[in-house]
């Protein structure tokens, strides 16, 4: 799980945090509320998830409960790959 | 100085130059000969040579006005539309503007009253800028001519306006991104009198009014719209040179082209942009339409690399930061028109704004529908019908879409429709330096609210959205950066039948529920045109005109200027953006993965601003004028001496 968290944090930092240091991102910070990712960014994130973890994300799974923080994403990926 | 100024505008009028000068004022004109090819040289004067005009554009109803003025005793020296304004101004002063059906920017100098009158058409089709410097007023159709007038005129980016552009896609009022240089706003005039006092006034406004809706059937409204459009097209074919048409493959340009075909005997040449990137390409529909009307069709294929290559020239002509590359293909298209020896094209611009075509209106309607029953589990799925053409559609997930579009705004909010878009665009502010963000004192949206909330009060949310889209996006971006500037870069004049003020005034009386019936956009226009268009064109889902953004700069080769303008040194020099953040964006762009709205807008916006800074602020040099071809000079010293050269 910690490896997934690390991979996700790196992706978010490299691709969405243009003006912040990596340690400013909390694992429970909401991407939407903090303005880190907008709804088109979410689909970019989904493409990366599918490619990186070799999973398929259904449209019904495109909900903030699965995708809106580092920890939620890690739990979602862990569930899909277990 | 006048020669230096007009030389910078030679792309707008390569057919000849005319100058007027006396001890107080100077006028210069670059001519694109379209009406009265032999006699229409400017500046033009009245009977006693006390009133002088330079004019850019067209007055389409000039033959009718000319006849009336002759009946009133005026003597005409030319057959041009420009001279009509001079005599009409003598009759009615600034109220002459009410009688003009056209697209124009004009300057009238009254040598007796020692006053200057500047005016611009109702919708802002032709540009007009001015600045005050050293107790003098400088004006021109493009900013570069003002900068060429005197090296002491301030050349600086206005950070508050830059933030506006990174929110609305354009400046919102009379300020431009160049500090101290203003535009005469659409539908306004300005007078400088002998004492140096400036008075400005709006003479026309887009007339959305809550009490003005027509009580008529859809069929009746469609018939009336058709009659108006036929006449608007007929007037816009008035020219002493052939008139062509742009054909995008969508409803609006197809409607205009079809009206030309059915109601005039004009042999029509049509011009289109096609894209090598299939996501943006509408070639099939363009071909279908040109075959249907049997036009002589010409197209230019636009690759990613071609957009990237043209981009610096596009910015030099646009004279503003832009957040999309969409003007670039139109820059290439106007060069195709020029190669075919055409100077004038009709286009379908304006229909989406005035007749209810844009997705932002549809989006607002869906949001309002959902908000009316927030507990409904079915209604949010309507959001999935929005933006089907986008690879990364914000509506692919109903839940994300709901959160994206739910701004907490009520239907009474003057900006109900636009808040989601502006919020997304403002995501680009993360790249702006803190000093830029602090410059205005409050957000661009708050400023706009202070200016326009009163004007929008009492209107329904659909009309409010149309008004904003017409005044902001149409007036300050589509007609300017995408329209006039890209056409005139190659001396091409666009004409816009949907923006005939009679059509606009009529469109404002169509009840909002009929402009977009359920989610059927431009409902009345479709009914008006159904019998003269292929059914597939009428039924086709709207595909907004777009062009590839980031991919245009990161194909097999990245243009060298990208690294140059986005280097740390250049970013520090302009002082507008955070270099570290820009470099992280640049690194992401180089990965060539699919990017979201924010990244695409930010990259194009930053690059265009940096090019603009380098071109006009840091390094602007007016070209030394060559001997002006076809030059006619009038030097007037209290009307004692006149010198005419050719």
Image: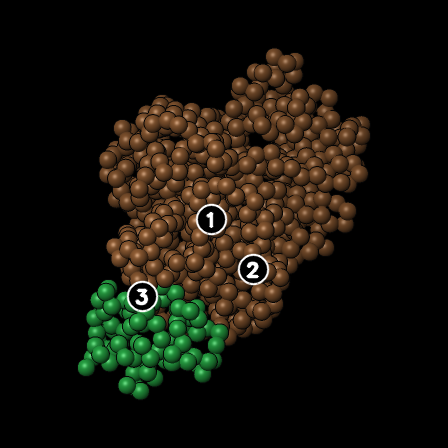
Residue in the image at 42% along x and 58% along y: B407
Task: Name the foreground residue: B364 vs B544.
Answer: B364
- Horizontal placement of B111 versus B427: left or right? right
Separation (CA) of disc 2 from disc 3: 29 Å
Residue B351: quadrant of the picture: top left
Residue B13 placement (x, y as % from top left): 56, 38
Query: Looking at the colours in the rendered structure, which chain would you say is drawn in green?
Result: A
Residue B145 placement (x, y as % from top left): 63, 47
Residue B217: quadrant of the picture: top left
Asked if labels 2 and 3 share a chain, the reply is no
- Horizontal placement of B639 versus B370: left or right? right
Residue in the image at 61% along x and 15% along y: B70
Q: Secondary structure at mark 2?
A: loop
Q: For mark 2, does the 10 Å Cα neighbourhood hold few (<14), some (14 to 19), or many (20 or more) residues?
A: some
Query: Could one spot residue B335 in this view of the protein?
Result: no
Residue in the image at 31% along x and 34% along y: B526
Query: Looking at the colours in the rendered structure, which chain would you say is drawn in brown?
Result: B
- Horizontal placement of B550 versus B89: left or right? left
Residue A43 has which mark?
Answer: 3
Residue in the image at 61% along x and 12% along y: B71
Q: Which residue is mark 2?
A: B443
Asked if labels 1 and 2 share a chain, the reply is yes
Foreground label between 1 and 3:
1
Residue B163: quadrant of the picture: bottom right
Task: Name the foreground residue: B585 vs B492.
Answer: B585
- Horizontal placement of B198 versus B607: left or right? right
Separation (CA) of disc 1 from disc 3: 32 Å
Q: Please give the chain letter of the residue carrying mark 2.
A: B
In the picture shown, does residue B486 fall above or below B632? below
The residue lying furthest to the bottom in this view is: A2
């Amino acid at each position: 799980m910690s490896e997934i968290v690390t991979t996700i944090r790196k992706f978010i930092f490299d691709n969405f945090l243009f003006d912040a240091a990596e340690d400013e991102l909390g694992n429970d910070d909401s991407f939407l509320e903090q303005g880190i990712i907008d709804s088109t960014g979410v689909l970019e994130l989904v493409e990366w998830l599918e490619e990186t973890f070799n999973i398929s994300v259904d449209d019904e799974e495109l909900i903030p409960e699965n995708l809106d923080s580092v920890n939620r994403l890690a739990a979602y990926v862990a569930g899909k790959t277990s | 100085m006048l020669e230096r100024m007009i030389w910078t505008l030679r792309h707008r009028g390569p057919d000849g130059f005319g100058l007027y000068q006396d001890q107080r004022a100077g006028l210069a004109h670059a001519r694109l000969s379209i009406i009265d090819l032999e006699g229409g040289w400017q500046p033009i004067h009245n009977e006693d040579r006390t009133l002088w005009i330079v004019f850019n554009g067209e007055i389409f109803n000039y033959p009718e006005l000319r006849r009336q003025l002759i009946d009133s005793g005026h003597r005409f020296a030319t057959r041009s539309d420009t001279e009509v304004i001079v005599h009409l101004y003598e009759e009615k002063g600034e109220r002459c503007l009410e009688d003009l059906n056209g697209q124009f920017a004009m300057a009238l100098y009254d040598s007796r009253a020692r006053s200057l009158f500047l005016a611009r058409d109702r919708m802002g089709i032709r540009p007009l800028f001015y600045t005050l410097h050293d107790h003098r007023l400088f004006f021109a159709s493009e900013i570069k001519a003002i900068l060429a007038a005197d090296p002491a005129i301030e050349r600086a980016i206005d950070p508050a306006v830059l933030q506006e552009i990174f929110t609305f896609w354009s400046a919102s009022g009379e300020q431009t991104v160049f500090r101290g240089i203003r535009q005469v706003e659409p539908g306004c005039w300005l007078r400088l009198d002998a004492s140096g006092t400036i008075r400005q006034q709006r003479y026309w406004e887009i007339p959305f009014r809550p009490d003005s809706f027509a009580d008529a059937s859809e069929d009746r409204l469609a018939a009336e719209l058709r009659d108006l459009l036929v006449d608007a097209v007929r007037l816009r074919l008035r020219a002493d040179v052939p008139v062509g048409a742009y054909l995008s493959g969508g409803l609006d340009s197809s409607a205009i082209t079809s009206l030309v075909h059915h109601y005039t005997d004009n042999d029509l040449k049509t011009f289109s942009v096609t894209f090598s990137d299939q996501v943006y390409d509408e070639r099939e529909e363009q071909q279908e339409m040109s075959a249907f009307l049997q036009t002589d069709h010409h197209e230019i294929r636009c690759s990613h690399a071609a957009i990237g290559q043209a981009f610096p020239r596009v910015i030099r002509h646009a004279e503003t930061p832009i957040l999309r590359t969409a003007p670039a293909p139109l820059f290439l298209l106007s060069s195709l028109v020029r190669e075919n020896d055409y100077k004038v094209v009709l286009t379908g611009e304006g229909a989406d704004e005035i007749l209810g075509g844009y997705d932002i209106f549809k989006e607002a309607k869906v949001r309002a529908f959902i908000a009316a029953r927030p507990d409904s589990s079915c209604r949010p799925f309507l959001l999935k019908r929005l933006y089907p053409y986008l690879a990364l559609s914000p509506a692919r997930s109903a839940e994300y879409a709901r959160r994206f579009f739910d701004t907490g705004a009520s239907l009474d909010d003057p900006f109900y429709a636009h808040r989601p878009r502006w919020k997304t665009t403002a995501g680009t502010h993360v790249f702006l330096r803190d000093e830029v963000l602090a410059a205005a004192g409050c957000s661009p949206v708050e400023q706009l609210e202070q200016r326009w909330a009163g004007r929008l009060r009492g209107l329904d949310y659909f009309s409010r959205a149309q008004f904003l889209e017409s005044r902001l996006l149409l007036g300050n971006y589509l007609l300017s950066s995408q329209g006039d500037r890209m056409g005139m870069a190659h001396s091409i004049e666009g004409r816009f039948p949907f923006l005939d003020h009679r059509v606009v005034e009529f469109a404002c009386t169509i009840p909002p529920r009929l402009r977009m019936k359920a989610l059927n956009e431009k409902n009345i226009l479709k009914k008006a045109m159904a019998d003269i268009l292929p059914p597939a064109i009428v039924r086709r889902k709207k595909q907004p005109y777009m062009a590839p953004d980031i991919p245009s700069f990161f194909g097999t080769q990245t243009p060298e200027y990208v690294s140059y303008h986005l280097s740390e040194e250049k970013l520090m020099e302009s002082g507008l953006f955070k270099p570290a953040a820009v470099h992280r964006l640049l690194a992401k762009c180089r990965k060539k993965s699919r990017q979201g709205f924010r990244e695409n807008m930010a990259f194009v916006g930053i690059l265009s601003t940096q090019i603009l800074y380098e071109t006009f602020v840091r390094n602007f040099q007016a070209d030394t004028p060559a001997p002006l071809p076809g030059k006619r000079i009038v030097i007037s010293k209290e009307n004692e001496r006149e010198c005419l050269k050719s």
